[in-house]
Image (cartoon, coloured by chain):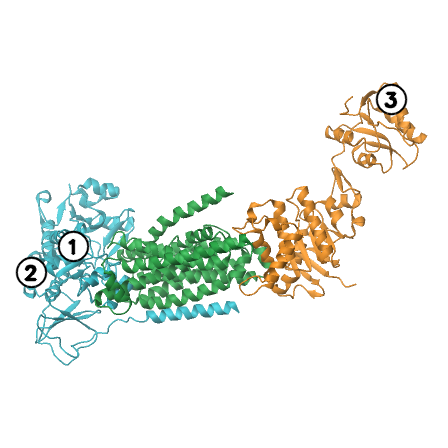
Amino acid sequence: MAYLFETKQMTVGYNGVPLIRDVEIRLEKGHILTLIGPNGAGKSTILKSIAKYLKTVYGTAYISGESVAEMNNRHLARQMAVVLTQKMKTELMTCREIVETGRYPYTGRLGILSPEDHRQVREAMEQVRVWELRHRDFMHISDGQRQRVMLARAICQQPQIIVLDEPSSFLDIRYKLELLDALRDMAREKGISVIMSLHELDLAQRVSDEVMCVKGEYITHYGTPDTIFKKKLIHQLYGLTEGGYNPYFGSLEMRRPTGEPKVFVIAGGGTGLEVYRSLQRSQTPFITGILHENDIDCQVARDLASTVIAERAFCRISDASYQQAEEALRRCPEVINCLTEYGEINGRNRDLLEAASVMGCQVRPFLGEKK
Amino acid sequence: METEIKKQCARRVAVLVILAAALLALVAANINLGSVRISLGEMMRILTGRATDATAADIVWKIRMPRLVAAVLLGGALSLSGFLLQTFFNNPIAGPYVLGVSSGAKLTVALLMVAVMSRGRALGAGWMIVAAFVGAMLSIGFVLLISTRVNRASMLIVSGVMVGYICSAITDFVVTFADDASIVNLHNWSRGSFSGISWNDIRVMTWVVLVTSVLVFLLSKPIGAYQMGESYAQNIGVNIGMFRVALVLLSSILSACVTAFAGPVSFVGIAVPHIVKTLLKTAKPLWVIPVCFLGGAIFCLGCDLIARTAFSPLELSISSVTAVFGAPVVIGIMMKKRRGR
Amino acid sequence: MKRTRFWALLLALAFLTALTGCGQTAPVAKTGLGNGTEPVSHMELRFAQQFSVDKYADGCRLITVRDDGRYLVVPEGVTVPEGISSDIVVLRQPLQNVYLVAAAAMSLIDSLGALDGIGLSGTQADKWYNENARRAMEEGRIRFAGKYSEPDYEMILSAGCPLAIESTMIYHKPEVREKLKSLGIPMFVEHSGRETSPLGRTEWIKVYGVLFDKEEEAQRLFDQQEAKMEEAEKDEPTGKTVAFFYISSSGSAVVRKSGDYVAKMVQLAGGTYIFSDPGEEDSSTSTMTMNMETFYQTAKDADYIIYNSTVAGELHSVAELVARNPLLAECKAVKEGNVWCSDQNIYQETMQLGSMVLELHALLTTEDPGGTQLRYFYHLN
């Protein structure tokens, strides 16, 4: 399989001191590779080395089989484009002029654009939907629009690969989505490969074809999102001690309350989420049940509750589970019931509720529910 | 072409035409104004080579003409130099002397004055010019040397300022051994003046300034790329190392040339690029470079006219006139920019 | 590729400018007119060493300034000799509308009564000490034509100026020299400052006498000054030591070196200049800024202090002197009441050097300092 972009035994670092060794990337045409990892791990170092801003300590990258180290600047400009994080400060340049600079590898001595160049510029700007902004001063538009303009500029270079360094860090969620959507479209429609680093794990999970984990001296994990975005791996990669990571959604929960549980939450099917989070905010430890495995509530509860009483997926609540729940109930002075509907598999939760009132637990309805 | 682009083009062409007209008007004013009144009729005869009054012809051709040609060329050189350095350092108050050019020139001129001239030995004016030029380029050499050790553009400014201080310190040291005459002369030299320019000087000046200016124009493309920052410039194929050296060298040759022939003339290099960019409403080098040259020529020519006629026969220092006109302009532009945000 | 191009360009430029600069060389001392004519006599000079004058049969005078130029003064009505050397500058009498920049020459020219020959001045009206000069400027007979460093070429050229009399300051401004040359205006640099003896300076009046056709007057005035000088020298040296200096605005002491003519005047008047430093005859600067230690060490024992008011301003009392530097209160001269101050314009009074020496002599020998009234020096109480 001929890869568009590869690195062979690439070792990167500053001043000849290796930071990360033996980076081996194999990227196909039109695929998106995302680098994830903790701050300072070396993601930017790798990207800078690929984009030739930094000299590699050893080894090099190859684009369509050609060595990047041996390419002259002009040739490299036609192969690789970049979009960087830093805030740019330009003077009196319109968005169009910014995008036009992307055509420099193709224009003549004085940089005057041909009709073909103008067409490319227009196409790129329309593709990322910034054509309407073309006459506006670059400094007078929003951050999100700016990043898309920079993307258009990169597209104009007609590269084979685009390198982005945390391109969405400063953007709000709308612009994050727009940018990554644009990237995805561009990769798919024009066959341009993308290498970027992201801090937003949820987005990385969704937009990438391949993911590389950067931490420590060697790359430990490199593969498709489904192999990378696992709870244990992510926890280890980022050294998470507080809170938890949910690999299904790429979402995060905050710190689990510690201590003796004071509240028993009866929930299931998503009804308990609000309660759990509210209890987390007040750092009140709680037990919850009887949930079913892979219930939404169960996933979140695993990160927040002191104990989770869960039944096998799709099964009726067994006696064993019920016993467990009753015992737990005895320890908690307070009970919150979130359920309003009871079905075949969780009907016994109604019994649990009755048992709670019999035991003398203070039963509270679902917080925020208005009667 | 779209209407927006048509409007832009029209604006820029209009600015160009107006400035060219202004230049012509100033040239005419400079030819006609001076301590001695020459009638228009005689002036026309002088200009077409059929002069009847030899003295008046001498005045026009040997005194006024070289001076105004020098002001045009050197004014253009200064503003180009300022533009280059402002772009390079992305700093609106960078000017032609930010890299220590004038301090280096002043040092060698001081050395020449103290070591040679005060002993009563006669030296041609050419030596002062060569000395100033050599001094300027030497200080640039040092600055470049220091900055090759550290790979950041900001280091250049720091090196420039430091080299400037060192040169000033050495100059003060040299002055300690100087007699009063040399001190006065050095002071006069540092004020800058277009007074003693000869046609010989013009010949050299024209070559240096025009050749360098054309080279600067040919660098429009990488300069335009550089306006987006070094990282992006490198990505689209600009050889940053060579570009830096080229830019520093070209701007230094221009400002060294001015300092050598007319002493340090301040403010033209700082103010004119701002004025030009505001007028043209763009920073595109293809436009800004020629218009900057034009603008600098106009500014310098106008200021020189005032300097030599306002309190005739006493001459004001050209730097004080340029500062008086230049500083408020720069302040005005800066304030307008802030408000516009 | 670009890089080598630039270096090559740079070198070429440096070379080019060096070429343009190589125009001037110091004139080699030549003798004679160059056309075979021999002078009939030479002007007798008693003290001056920096110039000489040869007289020719047809009335022409050749002034040779040492290490500088040669000037042939041709009287009115006489034809310019043929075949003279190219380095000789021809000046035709009568000289009118001369541009005078060297202020020191004014007093000499004025005493000759040759002020009418001057039409342009390098000094403004109110800066002249010389009354006649100031009045002439105020009445418009002499116009201000710009300082030596920035002359108003237009004015000079249109006035038909035949000669510019410059001081040695012009050497620091070669472009002005070259400009004047290209406009066809001859330049005479007066080197009286290089004379080591005071009367040598005064003897330069003979040069101006030649230029303005007042030779006899010049000789007469000079003889007068010489007589005064001899009167002062008649007495034995008094053995008194004199310090001549001023305190600059930065607080340091600026003294004239021992080779300077003021020091010489003191010697001639019978005193001893206290800052005596043999072997300093040739130095290019006439003043020296001394650090307080050395100065105090030497000056505290001086019998007389004469404060140089020409640069830092006049003093009116000893208290003012001490205010400039409290250390001076410890000086012998201050304690004994022998502190004097020079008149602010003594440097412009080049004609009166002989009188000045006489006055210095009086200063050094008087029993009653407070009651002695002098023109060029006054006693501080």
In the figure, the shade used to draw chain A is orange
Residue indicated by mark 1: C348
Task: Classify residue C282 as left or right of residue B146.
Answer: left
Residue indicated by mark 2: C221
Front tag of 3 and 1: 3
> How far apart are labels 1 and 2 at the CA level?
17 Å
Residue indicated by mark 3: A356
In the figure, the shade used to draw chain B is green
Q: What is the three-letter code of the residue carrying label 3?
A: Ala
Quick one: which chain is cyan? C
Q: What is the three-letter code of the residue carrying label 2?
A: Leu
Is mark 3 in CB contact (under 8 Å) with mark 2? no
Residue that appears at 32% across and 67% down: B199
> Is there one chain holding both mark 3 and mark 2?
no
Residue C114 in which image quadrant: bottom left
Task: Please tell me whether residue A75 is drawn above or below residue B298 in the rendered image.
Answer: below
Q: Chain of mark 1?
A: C
Q: Earlier in the sequence, mark 1 or mark 2?
A: 2
- Of residue A276 and residue C42, the one placed in the foreground of this image is A276
Q: The C terminus of chain C is located in which quarter?
A: top left
Residue B228 in which image quadrant: bottom right
- Crowding near the residue tagged with mark 3, few <14, some 14–19, many ≥20 C-alpha atoms within 10 Å: many
> How far apart are labels 3 and 1 at the CA level?
119 Å
Residue C113 in which image quadrant: bottom left
> Is there one chain holding both mark 1 and mark 2?
yes
- Of residue A185 and residue C265, the one placed in the foreground of this image is A185
